[in-house]
Amino acid sequence: MSRVCHQPVRMATGDAFSDEQIDDILDRMLKKAQRKGEAFDRAAIQEAAAELTKEELFARLSEQRLRVASARASQKIDAQLAAMTAVGDEADRLKAYNVGSEKQGLAASFSVDAEARARTTALWGEAERQLRDAGLMDRLSGFAVDEGFERAIRRERSRLNGADIEPTGDADALKVAEILNGLSEKGRLMQNDVGAWIGRLDGYSGRQSHDRLRVSGGFWREFQAGGLAAIKDMKGASLKASRRAFREWRDFIRPKLADETFAGIEARDVDDGWLDDAKALQRAGAIDDAADVREVFLYRVWFDIVSGKSEVLGGLDDIGDFRPPASKARSVSKHRVLHYKTPDDAHDYALRFGRGSLLANAMAELERAARNTALMNRWGPAPEAMFENTVGKLHAEARARGDVGAANRLMRAQRRAEFDELTGAGNQPDSLRLAMIGRSIRMQQSLAKLGGMVLSGLSDTSLAATAMKRAGATWLDGYNGALAGVTRMQGAEGKAAADLLDVGARSAAAHLTGRFHAADGPLGWAAQAQRFFYRVNLFEFWQDGLRRGVAEMYSAHLGAEAANPWAALNAGTRETLERYGIEADDWELVRKGLVSLDAARTEGFAGMRSRPEAGLDAPLDAAATAEPAGRRYFTFEALDGLSDRDLFKRAGLTGKEATPEAARRLREDLRVRVQAMVGGVLDDAMTEARARERVAMTRGIKPGTVWGEAVRSFTQFWSFSAAIMGRHVAPAAKGYAGQAPVALLAHLILASTALGYLSLQAKQVAKGRELRPMTDEDGEFQGGKLFLASLLQGGGLGLYGDFFFGEASRNGMPATLSAFAGPAVGEAEKLRGIMADLISGDPERLEDVPAAGFRFAKDNTPFLNLFYARTALDYLLLYRIQEAISPGSVARYEKRVEDQTGAGFIVSPSEAIGA
């Protein structure tokens, strides 16, 4: 462009822009004018200039927000890593920052993963409470999908967001739409609060999911596209199938998309390689017309979906649908999405190419917003770049100190795997079909092997009590809370307190997100079957009750501790607060907020809330700290009434820095830390695997590879044992809550062994067997063997106890290498043995094949091992079939059980069937 053309612009802008920037601005303005009319029409140019001014202002404000958010995150990273000196060296601190540590130290457990779980549970908790209070939970948590109801919800959501459509007249659909819209808006604002700039979309009806398998053409796409010829040329058939899949997807979605989906791409600058890429795609046969920029755009969308990029969190660049193609001028937080003409078009797409129900996707949208917020809050708007920069700085620190070990461990793949677990990149399979096969096999093994897991859950109460002891309560409090929960003997006030700690959120989320359409294929059916299985084997009932009971107890414990200043706190309470970054001044704010909440609730304390002027320095007087009538419960509401003045005092903000926005951020920061602490303690009580355990077991090996699926199958049932070792045994071995390691380990082992003994005997009765005796038939004492079996059953020795001792592991499997390796490996070994016998030609070996084949089928049939039904089924049918296939096998089985356990059957199987 001529230098003369720059002069008017230069006069208006001075030196704010370079000649190159002015060229770019003028060029974009002319392109906008072309789309509106003639390129040099005065009205079109004026309108284009006005729009361009808004865009430039938006971009500059976005860039400023980006810098502020990046600086804020950098300060958080430096401050928390510097405070983690007790955790270990640079590698240990980076690990703790991402996935947490059980070591005692300031913020050691307040990881990015902990914050993500806290934010997710908070949003899920709101959804659960609002839907339950509206009386709609039962309608939403059923197994059957009401397609008409979901379509009505989508229409109402779109109408509430500005779409010009008629109301459906369905009051329930409208209520659900209002709830989901409100929570979706909260998730949007959460992300904007940490650096994003996500605008509201007119007519938005909910986040769209994409079933990668459907979009890519289906499980058998090569054979559908190439027939039997695909066997000879699988690579060629795969390319042919991909081209066919894209065209089917394109032809279905293109008529349903609104014009704003393609806004701006018609005039895309060809200098950025767009046209060259398009021509290459056309030559390869991937697209039909390189000149059709809409088709090129849709191909890139399709490719990002089938490659899994849309499922990875991207911080500021996260959009949830796909990543836009690169452009010469960066558009910060201005993400291109698929805009449908109508909510019905969006719903039609969901039925054809989506995954899960509308409500399941709404819950997934909340989870994604929460996780992405935590990622940006802790790693900045550009998490990937900030992570790499931080690793470089920590590596330089270790090198300057001469610590080769720390420097090497910083660069290990494990540190990268921990970060990828947070973004989801580590869970994207290389081969979707291979990952699907592996997951289906493991899920089938769960359905076939865990019918008695609720009986194993008896020993979980000792682990819950251990977690509560570490959190500052007593062992007895832990047992009382657990038993009250599983027996449903809680009072109304305690249940309400537990609900306000969001304990119903996880169960409700499972109800909503676990529902998949039947058309989803094997994984949809399997997920639905797994949820039903956990319900009929009573494990869901047990877990929900246990979590609720422990939550009530912990709420009451924190409520009682609110009467104590920092120095007077129980050692365990203080240590737990510190592990989640809550210091003495923070605790004073928490207890003041709880007292203020009690003042608003309890008669006789009504005037206390009107005294915020006392400030943080004023001690809480006797009246303020006295227990209110009844039991005091802590809930997150206690943090809502904190005065701005107290928050400013805690943060040291004065003058212009002390703004309402600053107070809101301080209150939110404290709330997230407290929510993370409560959620972490409850997860410890439930011994649930978290990101740290998942990465430790898979070692960062991605699914969808032969090695990745082998590792996941080998470690299928390791998560419980790994969680015991990492979150119960290891901390106890170092001591906590003022207790010596000997006392803590003694309780952990003895209590889990005693409860493991009850579980062991309960399983004996459930199998129709006599209780295991203390002596054998010769009168020899068998207590040592029974002690080891009980210890194993209770989980006290974790994984290695499962392998070395006992007749049956926690999962009800024989304690052989197959139990150590996971059930799929053991079953594959059994099948190999059966096939070897079958082809051996040896008459003696062939004689055992029918019985072995029947046992294999019986052991791998889902739902056949439910503890309360299996014994009746054995006596009524299965023993008879086994005897008919292999005469004498039932008697031999009966003898083998008696030899291994020292206990016979209550009713002899061989006599019962007349063998």
Image (cartoon, rainbow, N blue to C red):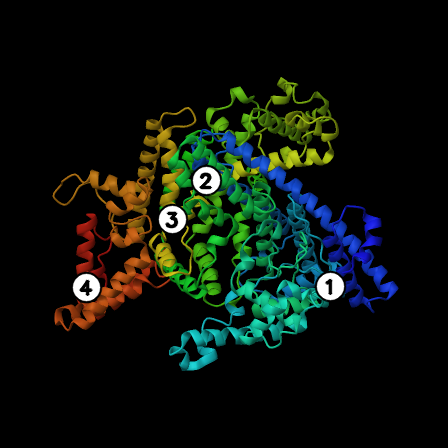
Secondary element at tag 1: loop
Secondary element at tag 2: helix
Circle 1: residue type: Gly
Q: Which of 593 and 546 is in front in this view?
A: 593
The answer to whether residue 607 is above or below residue 718 is: above
Q: Residue 889 carries which label?
A: 4
Q: Which of marks 2 and 4 is nearer the N terminus?
A: 2
Q: How crowded is mark 4: few (under 14 residues within 10 Å), some or many (20 or more)?
A: some
Circle 2: residue type: Lys
Circle 3: residue type: Met
Quarter of the C terminus within the rendering:
bottom left
Q: Mark 1 points at which residue?
A: 169
The answer to whether residue 477 is above or below residue 328 is: above
Q: Which of marks 4 and 3 is nearer the N terminus?
A: 3
Locate residue 65: give its quadrant. top right
> Who's the residue at 60% across and 34% down the image?
670
User: Which x, y percent locates residue 250?
Assistant: 60, 73
Q: Name the residue under label 2.
A: 95
Quarter of the N terminus within the rendering:
bottom right
Q: Which mark is residue 717?
A: none
